[in-house]
Image: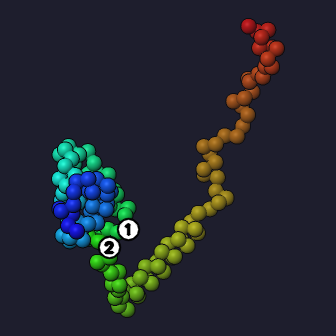
Amino acid sequence: MSVKKMKKEELELLSNKDITNLLLEEKGKRNTADLYREIIKLLDLPESTFDAKIGDYYTSLTTDKRFIMLEDGKWDLRSRHTSDKTIMVDDDDEEDLEELKEEEVEDNEEEEEEYDSTSNDDDDDFDDSDDDLKDLVVLDEDELELEQ
């Protein structure tokens, strides 16, 4: 049954994602704004709903596994698209990747050699002496009451 032929009462029982599913089945690829505008029109909602809820609608589509966003920014049903695409890697690309990995390992080894854990450079900022505390007096509650 066509979405356009459904009664408003029937459509109100469906979620926006379910209506989107029906629209995509009937009409194919569509962008977010067009889909949501059609839902608003079908449900006879005020136009202000678009601005107020378009973000929530987009989020709901991104989290629903039935839908997929294509490179052209349009939504379609995931069931229409296969993920059997393979990426061809030629030998040159593999060699380049290996060289990059080797360079990273060498860079990390150099950094480790440069680090000297016995160096006291960082310790200069920290003074562990108790000079700051020499004038400190600790009072118990009774002494504190006597001073007041």
Mark linked to residue 78: 2
The amino acid marked with disc number 2 is Arg
Q: How busy is the neighbourhood of tag 2: few (under 14 within 10 Å), some, or many (20 plus)?
A: some
Residue 3, quarter of the rendered image? bottom left
SS class, disc 1: loop
What residue lies at 47% left-to-right and 79% top-to-bottom? 101
Q: Quadrant of the C terminus?
A: top right
Residue drawn at x 80%, y 19% as measured from the top left: 140
Front one among 62 and 85: 62
Q: Amino acid at mark 1?
A: Lys
Snapshot colouring = rainbow
Count residues near mark 1 (Cα–Cα under 10 Å), then give few for <14, some for 14-19, many for 20+. Answer: few
Q: Which residue is mark 1?
A: 65
- Determine the secondary structure under disc 2: helix
User: Which image quarter holds the N terminus?
Assistant: bottom left
Q: Quick check: 61 left or right of 2?
A: right
Residue 71, x across and y down, in percent? 24, 71
- Determine whether 96 is above or below 30 in the image: below
Q: In the figure, 33 relative to 133: above or below?
A: below
Q: CA distance from mark 1 to mark 2?
A: 7 Å
Which of the pair 26/100 is nearer the observer?
A: 26
Q: Is residue 14 above or below residue 79?
A: above
Residue 138 image offset from top left, x and y in percent: 78, 22
Q: Are marks 1 and 2 in contact (CB under 8 Å)?
A: yes
Q: Is residue 7 left or right of residue 87?
A: left
Residue 18 x/y as whole percent: 31, 62
| Rendered residue at 62%/45% (across/down) | 124
Earlier along the polypeptide chain: callout 1 or callout 2? 1
